[in-house]
Every structure is written in C-alpha cells, then in structure tokens.
Amino acid sequence: MNKIRCMINDVQYEIEGLPPTMSLLHYLRDVLHLTGTKEGCNEGDCGACTVVFKDASAKPEPRYRAVNSCLVLLPMLHGKKFYTIEGLAKGEKRHPVQDAILEHYASQCGYCTPGVAMSLFEATYRHDMTQPWQFDEQMAGNLCRCTGYRPIKECVHALAGTGNDDFADKLREPEMALDTLDYEYDGVRFYMPVTLDEACDFKSSHSDAMIVSGSSDVSVLINKHARKCANFMCLINVPELKEVTIDETGLHIGSAARLANLEAMCQDKFVPFGRILRFFASHQIKQIATVGGSVGGASPVGDFAPVLMALNASVRLISSRGIRSIPMSEFILGYRKTSLEVDEFIYAFDVPPIPDNARCASYKISKRLELDISSVSGTCYVETDDKNIVTVARLSFGGVAAVAGARAKLAEAALIGKEWNEANVEAAAKAMEGDFTPISDMRASAWYRKTVACNILRGFYLETLENHVPARLYRPTSTLQLEQ
Ligand SMILES: Cc1cc2nc3c(=O)[nH]c(=O)nc-3n(C[C@H](O)[C@H](O)[C@H](O)COP(=O)(O)OP(=O)(O)OC[C@H]3O[C@@H](n4cnc5c(N)ncnc54)[C@H](O)[C@@H]3O)c2cc1C
Ligand code: FES
Ligand code: FES
C-alpha cells in the first residue's frame, strides 16, 4: 500500500488516511482549506469547481487542462501537478487572468468566477486555439448566471495563447515520477496500475473491482448515489490504453484515451467522431472522460455507441487470458448490459476506414446545445455501388430504446437494394416508425424521440447530397459575436 503523491500550487503532498472516494474538490476545501474553489452542483454541470492540472504527456507539447475537481477522485491526483485559483497570484501581483477579469468586468457574485478564471488560465497557455468554435467550447463548462457571457468571452479572446511567464516555464519542467498506486483506506482499495499486465492481474484476482477511466460517471454515482465498492481499478495511467492512432487500417481508440485528444484528431478524418464530440458534455469533462467509460456503462443515451455501431467498429477486450475482438453489435447485450466477462475490461475500439462510396454523419439533438445529455443521437452510414444502389446501411441511435446504439433494422432493410434517392429515403424514414418504442421522460416525449430519429435520416440524405462525409458547420453557441 502506498501514499498518494501529488503537487498542488507547487507544494508537495503525500496523502493517506482519507477515503479514496473523496473528491479533489472536498480535499481542497475541507482538508487543505483552499476554499477559493467552489462547489455548485457536485456533478460536473456548473464548472464552479474547475482547477487545472499539467498534462505532461499531451501532444505535441505538455499543456494545462481544466477539469471539474468534483469529478476527480483523490487517488487520481497521484503523480500529477494541480493548480487552483489560490495558485495564480504571486503575492500582490495578479495573474493576467485576474487582470483580464477586472478589465472586462467579468465577475459579479464571484461564485462562478474561480472556475471561470481556471478555464481562462488554461486558454492562456493553449497554442491550438485557431478556430471560432474552440473559443465557444473553452468556456462551455462554466455557468455564470449574473455577469453575462460577453465579458467572459472578451477575456478568453484577449488571453488565449498569450501565456509567457513562469507558468509557461513550468510546462517544460520534468514531470513527477509515475508509479503504480495501491491505496487503501477503511476497507476500500483503489488500484492504479501503470502496465497492462498489472491491470489484467488485478482484475483477474478482484473480479468485483469497479473499473474507473475518467471517472466522470463513477464520481457522479459516488457523489449523488452513494455508490459503495470495496475495490476500484483506475486505468488512466496505463500508456497503451491512452493511445489514439489513425492509419491505413482505420481509427484505433484506446479505451482510456481522453475525449479531448480524440476530438482534436477527428476534425478532418473520421469526422462523425469530431461532430459528436463538439457537443459532448463540456470542455472540462472531455479532458478526463473516455470512450471506454462511455461504452463500458452501456448507457442507452450515451453518444458514442451509435457512432461506433454505424461505423462498424469492433471492441478489443483484454484479460490475463488474452485479447479478444468482437463487433460492437455483439458487445452491447441489453439495458446497461455488455458481454464483458468478470475478469475483462475494454482495451480499445477499432474503426475501419470510411470508403469513398460511403456517406456518413453523426447527429446529437438535446435541449441545450452544450453540456446536455442527448434527447436523441444518431449516426447514419450508407454505402452505394456505381449505379447508386444501397449496398450497406447502418442506422444507429441513442435515446430511442433500452439498448445503447439501437439499430433501425426496418429502415435499413427498406434501403438495401434500392436506389439512394429522396423517395426511397422517405419510405425508409416511414419504416423506421416501426423500429423503436421509446419512452417519455423529462428530456423528451416518446413521440418526439421517434419523430426526431426519422428526421435524422431525412436530414442525413439532404446533408450528404454533395459532401458524403460532411464536417459540422460552425454555429455560434452564443448570440454574441466578437472579432477573432
Ligand atoms: C456533466 C456531465 C455531462 C455528460 N455529458 C455527456 C454527453 O453529452 N454524452 C454522453 O454520451 N455522455 C455524457 N456524460 C456521461 C459520461 O461523462 C461519459 O459517458 C464519459 O464518456 C464516461 O467516461 P469516463 O471515462 O469518465 O467513465 P467512468 O466514469 O470512468 O466509467 C463509466 C462506466 O464505464 C465503465 N468503464 C470505464 N472504463 C472501462 C473499461 N476500459 N472497460 C470496461 N468498463 C469500463 C465503468 O466501470 C463505469 O461503469 C456526461 C456526464 C456528466 C457528468
Ligand atoms: S461543482 Fe459543479 S461542476 Fe463541480
Ligand atoms: S459572477 Fe458568475 S454567477 Fe455570478
């Protein structure tokens, strides 16, 4: 058993004698009395608790990443350097972020301001903010109900990429050594391996262990549903699980790869992933959350299962017995049920290349554009031959059935062998009405879900008339437009 070693605001800490299920937010506020970081929702929705950590393994260069401290479990601090709002000013000298907030009048009640400041801090040291959507996305995880977003948006435009001080120098400093953490308190064990072998061995001897990747779901279960578990195994320090590669064999996504990395890589290639990720959760959540966590929980409203199903992905599962690869369609068995054996976990997802004769696009429909769970999400994939006849159709949806990534089999059958034209697509959309019997809940009625799924197919036909794999058009998520 060992201690959690980390640095917070350049001070080294060795943590023991605290529950591994304690969040970083509560450690900061209740143990270190760093109460600048605020608690709003305690479930990743408001951004008041935002802090940053240094991601030494980021490509092409180390960078800071803003995350929700309410979703970070204490052992996940191991081997990392974090900064909180208290770490910004040096004595009487304010940080440029603090000056910008003052100059632009970007704070009123101040409750959200520490979180806003930490997201602005990250932007200050980012060198990849070249697109308008990145400025919207940077602040999408920070609610502010009183100042209004104009001054906050002015700040992010003023600050992005300007950081050239000792915090920039710190990015070049050597990282803390990362070793395997085996942490236990009060009968709860939290294991964080650094090799695949260690991970497989632990899972085969602790079949009850709850797998944790980014913990954005698991922390909500702990914070809001008092979920108890004797053993946790967190995979985010195993390098092989964090890789994302694109080559001639397709897209390969390690189960513990950050969604933010996948999003950056899928702007021009495997565009359906880039499209869905733009409106997936928030910037902070994408910096920790993973595809393994999205699919591992087999949530029927998860946004990834439809994309993976429609693009005919397979899942590699690993245990100490070896690796097996199965199609996504065989992985999801039912409501929150997967074909994982008790000693297995997800290693990676393999997505084949998208051929030239394919059309595909992903869609997410939610009440709010950003930081909202889908009412319906869907990915459509169609291949046609040289006579424009449909040879392959995979239409996969979230939010319309109990299973993740449900296929619209009737609509697919109505398309196969037919010419790809508006009349036949309309017939398939009508057939799709028989595919699903969704439920009504607070997000959407059954009628709405079914209607929207059919309309996604109609919209897909129109959107792919010219460009077969269309990129997402930029739509500002605020009414406010600033000069770039
Ligand atoms: C505020 C908020 C907004 C969200 N918005 C969205 C959204 O827009 N769209 C969406 O789809 N989801 C959303 N989510 C849900 C969730 O964040 C995502 O599904 C995320 O991808 C989960 O990844 P994670 O790595 O954090 O999972 P974790 O919390 O670490 O794990 C989630 C589940 O997957 C299992 N698991 C994790 N890794 C593996 C593995 N390698 N092998 C087997 N099982 C594994 C865990 O045991 C657990 O059951 C949101 C969550 C929050 C809190
Ligand atoms: S307290 Fe709201 S996101 Fe953490
Ligand atoms: S300053 Fe953000 S809610 Fe008041």
Image (tube, helix red, strand yellow):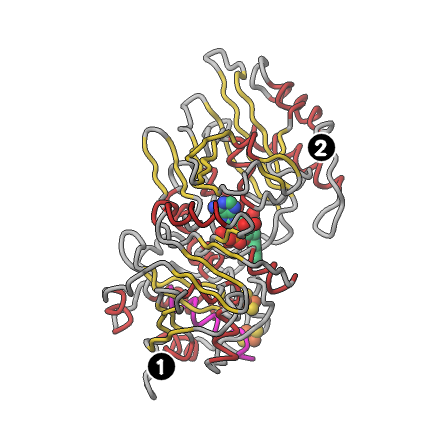
Q: Which one is in front, 285 or 428?
A: 285
Query: What residue would you read off at disc 1?
Result: 89
Q: Is 112 within the magenta?
A: yes
Which portion, as a residue range, is magenta?
109-122
Q: Amino acid at mark 2?
A: Phe
Q: Earlier in the sequence, mark 2 or mark 1?
A: 1
Label 2 SS: loop
Q: Is residue 95 left or right of residue 468?
A: left
Q: Residue furthest bottom?
A: 92
Predominant SS along the magenta part: helix
Disc number for residue 64 = none
On the image, the x and y values in percent for residue 474 come to 47, 47
Whether 33 is drawn above or below 341: the answer is below
Q: Which one is in front, 460 or 411?
A: 411
Corner quadrant of residue 402: top right
On the image, the x and y values in percent for residue 267 come to 40, 42
On the image, the x and y values in percent for residue 156 come to 41, 66
